[in-house]
Amino acid sequence: MEYIPNTKEEQQQMLKVIGAETIEDLLGDIPSEIRLTRGLQLPPPLSEPELKTEMLRLSERNADLLHHASFLGAGAYDHHIPSVVGHLASRSEFYTSYTPYQAEMSQGLLQTIYEFQTMIAELTGMEVANASLYDGGSALAEAAMMAVKVTKRNTILISSTIHPSYRAVLKTYLSGANARIIELPSENGATDLVAVGKRLSEDVACVLIQTPNFLGCLEPVEGLAQEVHRYAALLGVAADPISLGLLRSPGEAGADIVVGEGQGLGCGLNFGGPYLGFFATRKEYVRQMPGRVVGATVDTKGRRGYCLTLQTREQHIKRERATSNICTNEALAALSATIYLSIMGRQGLREIGRLCLQKAHYLKHRLCEIKGFEMAYQRPFFKEFVVKSPVSPSRINKKLFKQKIIGGLDLGTMDRRLKNHWLVCVTEKRTKEEMDQLVTAVKEITT
Amino acid sequence: MSESLIFDKSVPGRKGYSLPDLDVPEVPVAELMPADYLRKDPPLLPELSEVDVVRHFTNLSRDNYGIDQGFYPLGSCTMKYNPKVNEDVARYAGFAALHPLQPAEQTQGALQLLYQLEAALREITGMDRVTLQPAAGAQGELVGMLMIRAYHRSNGNPCRKVIVPDSAHGTNPATATLAGYQVQVVHSNADGLVDLEDLKHLVDPDTAALMLTNPNTLGLFERDILKIAELLHSAGALLYLDGANLNALLGLCRPGDMGFDVVHSNLHKTFTTPHGGGGPGAGALGVKSFLAPFLPVPVVEKTEKGYVLDIRRPQSIGKVQAYYGNFGNLVRAYTYIRRMGAIGFRKVSTNAILNANYIRKRLELVYPVPYNRFCMHEFVASAKKFRDKDVHAWDIAKRLIDYGIYPPTVNFPMIVEEALMIEPTETEPKENLDRFCEAMLSIAKEIEEDPARVRNAPHTKSVARLDEVRAVKQMDLRWRPA
């Protein structure tokens, strides 16, 4: 049983219709020199019960967050996923469907994408959004490439406070383009406005920032937007969508492109993927936008319906002149986000924002009471912050792990200048009890 | 019956979420956050109860079509059945609730899975190393082309062009451009294969690579593959395989043995991870050892201390994903591979080939197949002869919807006029293949008797033929409050 229904008899009947004796007769085009004359060296096949036992054992070699309280964020967040999200996204009419190229047979999915685009546009304060990109990093890279096309300029100013992996992905994506990428220095945990002013010129396509940034700090988006627009460059902002029920949208503050990682919106941590890149911009740039887009239209009887639209931007039509090479996207993750935002609604998202904000500040307050601990930056923050610790955060994390707590990220392992800097994240799932337990453990190790 | 938009169902004050009360002393927001960072008008998300949300999306799912409902012969897309056990395993807490930045000692099971999946894909494709980082086929292509570029540059050879066949997927030329190359097109010959003479004219020291799909998008095996490889390699150029059609080759032959230097495999096609309505996918990329130094970081290695993520690779092209790829799909693909074993894969490819040839044979008299010979896992028929009735491939596709079957890929590849690209996969029972053939033959009859019925299809769905031109002209990409 290899998920192949046809019996030997049926295979014989089919061969007869084809006019072949054996299946081997059909393979004559494969040159004999390259025919595999041995079996593949793979582990022997497992029955379903054996398979489930083996895979469960493998999964149990990991420390899952069902049994550990996590204060680890840094771009991937342990937010609560309402039960309905998994159940509805598991409707196989959705998850076993293909890209909705045949609109009349795919109205259900197309409508959810239209709703997703609306929700992302609403959250980000932009006019239009696409149907999704791979993740936050590639979405940022696509934003830079769009800005180069829109402005016909080739310098990209990227803040050093953006997630280091996003910056790395952007550099990879643009390594084939004729673009100059300049990193902007930071000042007190956020993009250095003075440095931005110095580096802006008529060659700059865009300035890219993230808010809250990798260090948890909020960036002064409005001030930056004014500077950037003075040079007719674009401002691209990577945002945390969970924050946008409470915090001002980048669009309202003047951003031209808003992208980000949507994993927090009902998608599991999954050891790093699948995640959800989102992309929103102004209507005037829609024809330079990457990725699929769904539009509303009418049928021959005047009834409303939905279809993929503006496809002449895309690779399957435009080939080497496409706005991006993306084809497969993250549709199922976008569906999860749409269900998530529907169940949360405008009050629920705001409430999550309130819980994250209050709890994160509680933990910051408690940690900074401990001798030797202090905030690394004096900036407003949302659910993540950096504390300077008198001892190595990795050492603290090891101790915490024994108590089933996963500590924040030791930034010193990524950047030597950030030795003893601890990036701590508090979502709505963390309880006062867990935070107090963490504080007690930290006290024990440092005093 | 169509479902109204979720925004139109919103009732102010209705609530579907359930969150804990704040359990720490509340501090006024003004003390934590300057006013100009706060949102004044909440985003216009709907306000609904849980049952409202459940019914909305359940009803929408019923106006959609997946492989679980029936046949999906979408050429080049390998819409095969997605085993349910994959879904169960991917949801085990140790895989699903794992943070990508947990220290390696907490994630040994996940790293072991990545390591063993790489080993299995190396063996299946005949390549030396495989990166699992690309999120989809197109991202795999980008990684592959950037690695090819890095390789040529490391040899002091700034090649400028990439060759793609006229039958190639659109992602190939789009990716080559993104990687900074000029695209040249090599034509197909009368057999539907790469024209060797044309290729000879094009290949020169400025050629970085040929991006080839094999079996090609006509479902035909490139019989001259060894000559093609030799031609490229003798000019210092590399051979890239778009592995979209790998399902046809499993256990029969391996790209690595054919001379391919780089191969991407769409795990969401060949290795049964669901398409999810357009994604997520996973685009594993295999390379020969001389390209391994350029692999994206991190690379999973096995050491005495266990599995580790190696980031110290000075010649690496960098990263294309923030973390390690679409891990959830990698779990599904690995589960499938462990279920199949070597013998299972051979049955997959041979049954996929058998099913495709069966349909080809049953339809060939009514739907001519321009390059008609034993095909691999798919074939391309033409609806050109129906043009005199003003019926096009697109209309036949729409009419198939009324028969409850998802239509084949249409109007691709571009070298066949009015193309109908049909890929049944190995997971379809004979009676469904017969039902499809009978539907196609019945539509051909309808075209003779009542072409308007076909031209105006579909007639049985919640919407009739949609006005796609209007969707472009009167752009409506989002809901707005009345």
Image (spheres, helix red, strand yellow):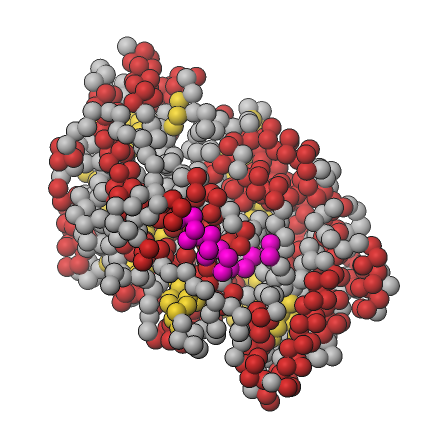
Query: Percent from the top left, x then y, of residue A254?
Result: 19, 55
Nearest the viewer among B207 and B473 is: B473
Nearest the viewer among B88 and A377 is: B88
Please tell me whether residue A285 is drawn above or below residue B37 in the rendered image.
below
- The residue sitting at the right extreme is A21
Q: Is residue B200 visible?
A: no
Name the residue at 48% across, 67% down.
Answer: B462
Instruction: Tell me: B393 left or right of B252.
Output: left
- The residue sitting at the bottom extreme is B388
Name the residue at 44% across, 61% down.
Answer: A110
Please tell me whether residue A370 is drawn above or below residue A34 in the rendered image.
above
- Is B55 one of the magenta-colored residues? yes
Range of magenta residues: B53-69
Query: Percent from the top left, x then y, of residue A241?
Result: 31, 46
Query: Percent from the top left, x then y, of residue B108?
Result: 54, 29
Name the residue at 18% across, 50% down.
Answer: B41
- Write down the quadrant of residue B375 in the picture: bottom right
Instruction: Tell me: B290 left or right of B467.
Output: right
